[in-house]
């Protein structure tokens, strides 16, 4: 189901009012007059209220909330204040933005061991497909599952080796 952004002028006004009144806080959804990212948009702890009011998506709201809560307070407020400019208008389809964001975050990870990267790459490919409106193919899932199983097997083998090494070292200690 596609949800399009709506009530942009109200979004812009509501965000500006909360920022100007210093009502944007971290740690509480909505106190009745102050709130976090979701709280100030929904005036509750329910992201679905902001979905209905502004045509935003729950995944975007949850991601934005997570970022907001982890930023220093002044940067969190600036992030909240900048949000309407990113939305910019009514009629935007944000339904796949979270897949783009998650794929970008996986791409931004530091270099991984090949066994780990083999698990991440099929997930990125799947998210790219979902971001393009395509279904996650069974072949990509099978590749992901196989890579995940191989990584789990490698971790299990390493743990067994570590167990044996530790027991041998303890036994050999004087």
Image (spheres, grey):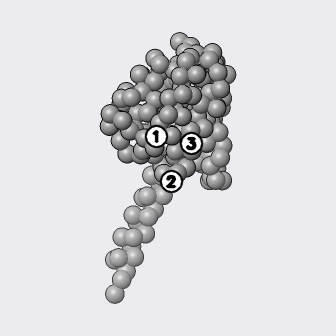
The percent coordinates of residue 55 (x first, y second) are 53, 19
Of 22 and 128, nearer the camera is 22
Q: Secondary structure at mark 2?
A: loop
Q: Does residue 172 sit above or below 23 in this rendering?
A: below
Q: Which residue is mark 3?
A: 79
Q: Residue furthest bottom?
A: 174
Of 33 and 93, nearer the camera is 33
Spatial CA distance of label 1 from label 2 is 19 Å
Q: Which residue is mark 2?
A: 72
**What label does residue 21 carry, if any?**
1
Residue at (61%, 42%) from the top-left corner?
105
Give the number of marks. 3
| Sequence-first tag of 1 and 2 | 1
| Sequence-first tag of 3 and 1 | 1
Q: Secondary structure at mark 1?
A: loop
- Callout in the foreground (1, 2): 1
Say left or right for 91 vs 19.
Answer: right
| Sequence-first tag of 3 and 2 | 2
Within 10 Å of disc 1 (Cα), the crowding (few <14, some 14-19, many 20+) is few
Residue at (48%, 51%) from the top-left corner?
73
Q: Residue furthest top?
A: 1
Residue at (48%, 58%) from the top-left corner?
158
Q: Which quadrant holds residue 86?
A: top right
Spatial CA distance of label 3 from label 2 is 10 Å
Q: Which quadrant holds residue 23?
A: top left
Q: Does residue 33 sit above or below 71 in this rendering?
A: above
Q: Which quadrant holds residue 45?
A: top left
Within 10 Å of disc 2 (Cα), the crowding (few <14, some 14-19, many 20+) is few
Of 75 and 17, nearer the camera is 17
Is disc 1 in contact with disc 2, using a CB cutoff of under 8 Å? no
The percent coordinates of residue 24 (x first, y second) are 45, 41
């Amino acid at each position: 189901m596609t949800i399009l952004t709506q009530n942009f002028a109200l979004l812009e006004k509501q965000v500006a009012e909360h920022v100007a009144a210093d009502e944007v806080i971290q740690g509480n959804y909505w106190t009745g007059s102050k709130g976090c990212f979701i709280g100030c948009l929904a005036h509750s702890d329910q992201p679905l209220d902001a979905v209905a009011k502004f045509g935003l998506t729950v995944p975007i709201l949850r991601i934005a909330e997570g970022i907001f809560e982890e930023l220093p307070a002044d940067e969190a407020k600036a992030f909240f204040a900048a949000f309407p400019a990113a939305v910019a208008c009514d009629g935007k389809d944000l339904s796949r933005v979270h897949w783009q964001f998650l794929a970008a975050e996986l791409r931004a990870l530091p270099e991984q061991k090949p066994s780990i990267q083999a698990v991440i790459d099929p997930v990125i490919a799947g998210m790219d497909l979902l971001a393009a409106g395509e279904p996650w193919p069974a072949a990509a899932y099978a590749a992901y599952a196989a890579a995940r199983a191989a990584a789990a097997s490698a971790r299990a083998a390493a743990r067994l080796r570590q167990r044996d090494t530790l027991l041998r070292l303890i036994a050999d200690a004087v």
